[in-house]
């Protein structure tokens, strides 16, 4: 359930409105602005057909300069739109900078929606002119305006000892697969943290959270994650902050997986006994993206052979004679097939909103976790009609 009372950390305000980009007429243009410069970290899609917003943000990131604001449109991805798309993306940042009286290069941009369509700049620029009128500390309007095929807004928050807060919002439902980030995910904090330390830790946090989510195996052109910290709550214990930030992002990642297009169940795969964390994550993600395993989850079929298959093709090291697999906590394989009540296990899967596979590869001590969802006929229906 959405938290209607959730507010941004001190010093942040946000606005959202309907600019006419979504055919539904729902809010589709939004911004977040900080009253002070922010330390920030960023990760963008690794797609080689990345959209204009990802490319521009990457350039700003390399400069190391602080940022003050973020502007987002939902409805048009502004990907595969050539030089005009890049100019339109820059104009979006410039327009928000002008109305907020901040530098254009202190504004991040993000666009999501249909690939290959140019932004309707008359609507975008007109909407940006009115965004300052809607500014408030309420978080839900922004979380709602960034949605596309999502069925619900996704938010998470935590308060640190001393009062500093981290508030996160995400969108994502389809075209979700690792190589970050295949969704939008933003975190805002009033903690004072060193930018270098934040950036050093961020890739690992992304790897264990948003890059551990897969819905359909397709990596987007447009999507990204960023964390902005304006320091207005003063210094915090850095390890505690980073742990809390990862917790917020983990929460958002699970919400994205649970809200996968057509999903009826969250799929969680926990892999231990791996040679390295990277191999554990690879094995877990491969299981979560397997159409065969996802279909079995949808049908509440405890077909553990599909787990063996997925782990094997992941390339992770495994000792099959020591390997163990459990479904909903029920052991089904331990170097050989185990006797278990398949009907009861199926009933456990059917009754649950989250289906969990625990796997031990039998070769080491490292572990990792990934999240996905079941594969339903509704997923096909949603994507068959996406632009028509």
Image (spheres, rainbow, N blue to C red):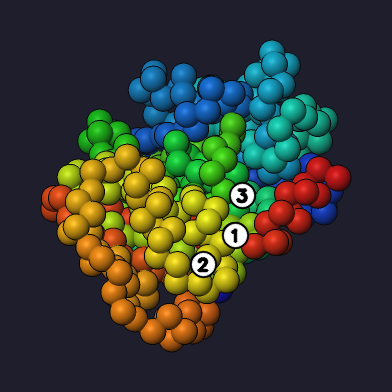
Residue 124 seen anywhere in this rendered image of the structure: yes
Can you say which quadrant of the picture contains the N terminus?
bottom right
Q: How many other residues sit within 10 Å of disc 2, few (<14), some (14-19) or many (≥20)?
A: many
Label 2–label 1 contact, CB within 8 A: yes
Of labels 2 and 3, the one closer to you: 2
Identify residue for label 2: 297
Pointer 1 or 3: first along the chain? 3
Q: How many other residues sit within 10 Å of disc 3, few (<14), some (14-19) or many (≥20)?
A: many
The one of 108 and 272 positioned closer to us in this rendering = 272
User: Which label was assigned to residue 174?
Assistant: 3
Task: Judge from the rendering whether residue 241 lies leftward or rightward of residue 109; answer left or right.
Answer: left
Identify residue for label 1: 375
Give the percent coordinates (x, y) of residue 133.
69, 48
> Label 3's element?
loop
Q: How many other residues sit within 10 Å of disc 1, few (<14), some (14-19) or many (≥20)?
A: many
From what the image shows, is residue 139 above or below residue 123?
below
Pointer 2 or 1: first along the chain? 2
Can you say which quadrant of the picture contains the C terminus?
top right
Q: Which residue is pictured at 45% across the width and 51% down the height?
A: 213
């Amino acid at each position: 359930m959405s938290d209607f009372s959730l507010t941004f950390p001190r010093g942040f305000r946000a606005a959202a409105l309907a600019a006419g980009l979504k055919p539904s007429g729902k809010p589709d243009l939004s911004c977040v602005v900080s009253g002070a410069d922010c330390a920030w970290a960023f990760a963008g899609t690794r797609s080689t057909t990345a959209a204009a917003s990802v490319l521009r943000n990457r350039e700003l990131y390399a400069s190391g300069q602080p940022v003050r604001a973020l502007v987002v449109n939902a409805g048009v991805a502004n990907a595969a739109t050539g030089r005009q798309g890049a100019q339109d993306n820059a104009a979006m940042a410039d327009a928000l900078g002008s109305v907020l009286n901040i530098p254009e290069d202190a504004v991040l941009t993000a666009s999501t929606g249909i690939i290959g369509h140019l932004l309707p700049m008359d609507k975008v620029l007109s909407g940006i002119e009115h965004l300052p009128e809607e500014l408030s500390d309420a978080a839900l309007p922004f979380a709602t305006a960034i949605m596309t095929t999502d069925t619900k807004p996704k938010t998470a928050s935590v308060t640190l000892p001393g009062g500093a807060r981290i508030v996160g919002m995400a969108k994502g439902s389809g075209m979700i697969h690792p190589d970050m980030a295949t969704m939008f995910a933003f975190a805002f904090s009033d903690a004072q943290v060193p930018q270098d330390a934040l950036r050093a830790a961020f890739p690992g946090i992304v790897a264990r959270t948003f890059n551990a989510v897969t819905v359909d195996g397709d990596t987007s052109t447009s999507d990204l994650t960023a964390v902005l910290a304006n320091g207005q709550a003063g210094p915090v214990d850095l390890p505690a902050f980073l742990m809390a930030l990862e917790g917020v992002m983990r929460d958002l990642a699970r919400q994205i997986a649970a809200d996968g297009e057509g999903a009826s169940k969250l799929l969680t795969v926990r892999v231990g006994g791996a040679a390295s964390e990277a191999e554990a994550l690879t094995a877990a993600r491969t299981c979560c993206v397997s159409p065969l395993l996802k279909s079995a989850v949808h049908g509440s079929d405890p077909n553990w052979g599909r787990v063996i298959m997925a782990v094997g093709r992941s390339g992770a090291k495994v000792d099959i004679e020591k390997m163990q697999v459990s479904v909903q906590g029920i052991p089904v394989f331990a170097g050989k097939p185990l006797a278990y009540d398949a009907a009861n296990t199926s009933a456990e899967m059917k009754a649950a909103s989250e289906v969990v596979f625990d796997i031990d590869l039998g070769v080491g001590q490292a572990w990792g976790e990934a999240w996905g969802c079941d594969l339903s006929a509704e997923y096909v229906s949603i994507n068959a009609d996406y632009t028509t």
